[in-house]
Amino acid sequence: MRTKVAIIGAGPAGLLLGQLLHAYGIDNVILERQTADYVLGRIRAGVLEQGTVDLLEEVGAAARAHREGLVHHGVELAFGGVRHRIDMHAATGKTMMIYGQTEVTRDLMDARRAAGLTTVYEAADVTPHEFDGNHPRVSYVKDGATHEITCDFIAGCDGFHGVSRKSVSAAIRTFERVYPFGWLGILSETPPVSHELIYTNHERGFSLCTMRSMHRSRYYLQCSMEDHIDQWPDDRFWDELKRRLDREAVDHLVTGPSIEKSIAPLRSFVAEPMRFGKMFLAGDAAHIVPPTGAKGLNLAASDVHYLSQALREFYDEKSYAGIDAYSTTALARVWKAVRFSWWMTSMLHKFPDTGEFGARIQLAELDYLVSSQAAATSLSENYVGLPF
Ligand code: RFL
Ligand code: PHB
């Protein structure tokens, strides 16, 4: 098989890149290790920046998001038992959209199918070759037979545990912080506790009330990395959440059986650079942020925006300028989101080693945020998404 761009990974980064390239007349093939249903079963992100929605619109995959997504103008920060609303739309003129990663993925898969583009699911042993030279190719095994795709470029959109970054490990520099706690998340068929997301700093640990729709809620609790979901039956989860919420939120909380429950570690990670000859990294393959800033999926979208523009410039104008600039351009935005996610995480979680002093500093910072328009605007600019 021959294509212009071989994309490894059918997560949001790979699927969105595929549709953007298709819109620019650049043919591409996606190789995905899992089945489509497996990819769709992962419950992850929920908040889309306006820039991410704009990209979905550009590829004609935003109709359902506009119908079913919930447009949010602000968030609530809770500390000391009191909730404070930050009006991000007033501060920036921008909004966010609540629309699950699962739905984004489904819409992009549907668009890809409708466009007749090739996706190979259950592709095993995917391996990029010769991206340093002029004949890049990707091999994989499907149904016991080895296949090869020759291409002009390889896009490594295969997430944190993918093969792309591993294949260049000798050439990269990594930066990492692993946080000493995780997030225990549940999904339930219950109405959300508030119209807004509620981020809570509490002496028992962080909590987040979020949603997927007006009848489906998602909640997170800071937990120990030693915890296992078996130790968290639903009743224990709801009891602990109630302890961390303000009185009014507890009164409005509707509990019910969980339909999904998982524990995620929290990590900040960046690999530099994001280009190796004719192979590029994009999305979680190149960087991870803790979910506190709601940035992971949105960074995957901004990376593939830059990458698709660079490739378009190459095919339209035979210019390498965008390709040469890709890593630097993408990393400049990545690091700002890494900083923001680290800062939100530091301000809102209970840390085992910072003591009473650290806890007071967090409260002072939160109090400053809700009493200074300048501070609230800075938070808002980052949360709604810095410009591309
Ligand atoms: P993905 O989604 O991991 O997709 C990578 C794909 O590559 C495939 N793959 C391979 N394919 C072929 N060969 C191989 N060797 C392969 N190895 C892997 C995988 O099967 C997979 O299908 O990466 P991508 O596309 O870069 O997308 C990144 C986002 O998924 C991620 O950043 C977000 O989910 C992070 N995140 C959030 N981001 C937000 O923007 N807003 C949020 O509100 C938000 N909340 C979250 C989150 C992540 C969470 N978890 C569980 C990590 C909440 C949570 C709890
Ligand atoms: C979610 O809806 O799953 C979500 C929202 C905001 C975050 C993280 C996750 O910061």
Image (spheres, rainbow, N blue to C red):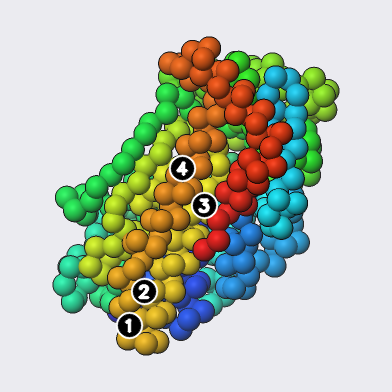
Residue picked out by circle 3 = 297
- Residue nearest the observer in this picture, 306 or 280: 306
Question: Which residue was labeled with disc 2?
Answer: 322
Q: What residue type is labelled 2?
A: Gly
Q: In which quarter of the image is the N terminus?
A: bottom left
Residue at 68%, 54% (x, y): give it.
92
Q: Mark 1 points at which residue?
A: 319
As helix, strand or loop, the secondary structure at mark 1 comes to loop
Mark 1: give few (<14), some (14-19) or many (20+) Cα within 10 Å.
some
Q: What element carries label 3?
A: helix
* Dot placed on the residue nearer the N-terminal end, 3 or 4: 3
C-alpha gap between disc 1 and disc 2: 7 Å
Between the C-alphas of marks 3 and 2, the distance is 23 Å
Question: From where the camera sits, is residue 121 visible?
Answer: no
Q: In this view, does 178 lie above or below 164?
A: above
Marking on residue 339: 4
Residue contact between numbered discs 3 and 4, judged by CB atoms under 8 Å: no
Q: Give the structural element (helix, strand or loop) at label 2.
A: helix
User: Do labels 1 and 4 touch, CB within 8 Å?
Assistant: no
**Which amino acid type is shown beneath numbered disc 3?**
Leu
Q: Tell me how far mark 2 sits from mark 4, CA to CA.
A: 25 Å
